[in-house]
Amino acid sequence: MKEVKKRPQICLTLNCRTPEEIKAEIDQYGDACQAVEWYPETGAGLEQYSKDEFIQLLKLVKIMCRNKTFFFGFQGDEEETNRYLRLAMGVADYLVIDWKNSQAKQLIKEAHRRRTKVLLTYHELERIMTKDEISMEFVKMEGCRADMLAIISFANTEADAYAILEGSFAYNQLKGHTPFLAIAMGDEGQASRICGGDFGSVMTYACGSKATAPGQFNAHDLKRYMDKYYR
């Protein structure tokens, strides 16, 4: 197998309730990452903000990111999610859109018109995806014309995690492929968060003081592991 060996960027993913919590996490962990992703916590009280107030909140978070790439996503019912995604257009650097969203293609077009890029994500947490399924899923996702793709699947064994990485590597061999990341969640998939660059991933996720997904490292620990691995 030909080695890619390009170190992925670290994205600090936050699930915070308030601007103060966001600032504290970025102050503590921001030196270890190149990007920040904010998913407002369920029940964070966003309904109290008017449209203009929410946009000002997003602009404040972007300033806190200190020239790092700012990703914004939301997890609610589809109508609520899409409302917040549209408000973030023109402010966030990237929107995080689920490929299963029935309006995904339309949202991507709207985001691009507002000069906002899109990370299109596919999560499969109920079963193990094979190498071939991973590579073919990436090919299907390309049709939405997003700027970056992500496939995240749960790994019960090291073999599961390796299949996810192998599938991403197969996609990486296609000429003109879309930049992507592939992560195997869970303790058995932790290595994928470190060595994904060997298989073509351009980014990996880390948490701050609390994990937002199974198997996550905090940003300082992940940076230390990657410093050794990509040395």
Image: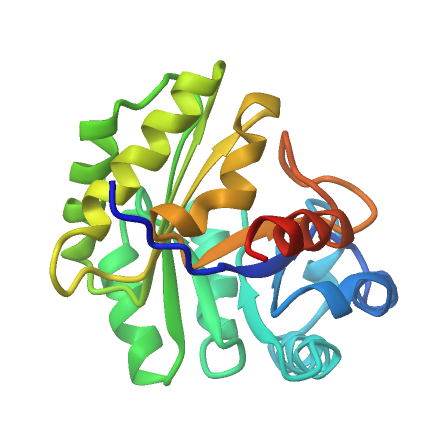
Residue at image position (36%, 18%) is 128
Give the answer, above or below, for where 58 lies relative to 130.
Answer: below
Most foreground residue, 165 or 114: 165
Count all numbered tags in the image, as a single digit. Answer: 0
**Quarter that holds the C terminus:** bottom right
Residue 128 appears in the rendering: yes
Residue 106: x percent and y percent?
Answer: 24, 64
Q: Nearer the viewer, residue 92 or 186?
A: 186
Describe residue 157's horizontal placement relative to residue 181 as left or right: right
Q: Is 126 located above or below residue 123 in the figure?
A: above
Q: Is residue 53 above or below residue 213?
A: below
Q: Residue at x 34, y 54 (%)?
A: 4
Q: Residue at x 20, y 46 (%)?
A: 171
Can you say which quadrant of the picture contains the N terminus? top left
The x and y percentages for residue 199 are 35, 46
Please indicate whether residue 90 sits to the left or right of residue 167 in the image: right
Q: Quadrant of residue 212?
A: top right
From the viewer's perspective, is 218 left or right of 100?
A: right
